Amino acid sequence: MKRLPLPGLNGLTPNTIFCIGRNYEAHARELNNPVPKRPVIFTKPITSLCFDESIIPLPADFGEIHYETEIVVAIGKAGRNIPVSVAEEYIAGYAIGIDFTARDLQSELKQKSHPWEIAKGLDNFAPVSSFVEKNQISDPNQIGLRLLINGEEKQHGNSTDMIFPIVELISHLSRYFTLNPGDLVFTGTPEGVGPVKSGDKMTAILGDHITSLNVTSQAE
Ligand code: ZN
């Protein structure tokens, strides 16, 4: 499979897709999950990555598919055991993305203590907008994010409400995984997640329209 470069980042090729679960307290509570003491980490396959104007397939028999709007960080240089104090240097840029989740299936898998990859990792379940270079964001701890579905606001949040700020996530991930250029980190969703139906037009927006993502869902 030929990997397309990350839009907006000068030929940086996507690599591992890391995702953080339950990074906003209000979202952990809305799904009756405990607030974590350490970041909850999972990954998505590279085939789940897609870009602006993509179609998101909703498979039959999977139950509800939820949107989770998230700030996405692209890593710009390799590192391991990165201290929090210098973690910002490893960021190449930011985008807005949606972590699509087959919620009914995920709940069933969680109950059985099974891995939940299939509920999170289907083709096109990780769309991201065009990236902006990190100097376009003055304060990574004050980035707004929003989601509109068919023009109606469904989610809005701000990175200031993250349980683990972006630099802590990078530092924490790098204790266990060597980070590489092109790695992506989905940094968790604020509250307001919910189901999508076929034909929904979703617009996810980073900050004050710094960059945005448009995708449409379609039943399979
Ligand atoms: Zn998520």
Image (cartoon, rainbow, N blue to C red):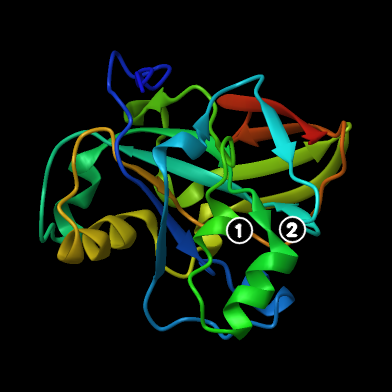
Q: Mark 2 points at which residue?
A: 193
What x and y, as percent, mark residue 133?
35, 25
Q: Is mark 2 on a helix, strand or loop?
A: loop
Graded by Cα atoms within 10 Å as few (under 14), some (14 to 19) or many (20 or more), the crowding at tag 1 reads many
Who is closer to the viewer here, 167 or 214? 214
Residue occupying image coordinates x 18% and y 40%: 180
Residue occupying image coordinates x 50% and y 22%: 130
Q: In this view, does 213 lie above or below 126?
A: above
User: What amino acid is at disc 2?
Assistant: Val
Q: Which mark is residue 96?
A: none
Residue 71 appears anywhere in the view = yes
Who is closer to the viewer here, 158 or 53? 53
User: What amino acid is at disc 1?
Assistant: Ala
Q: In which quarter of the image is residue 20?
A: bottom left
Q: Name the residue under label 1.
A: 119
- Assign the C terminus to one quadrant of the image: top right
Precedes in sequence: disc 2 or disc 1: 1
Q: In this view, does 108 lie above or below 132?
A: below
Residue 26 appears anywhere in the view = no
Residue extending farthest top: 10
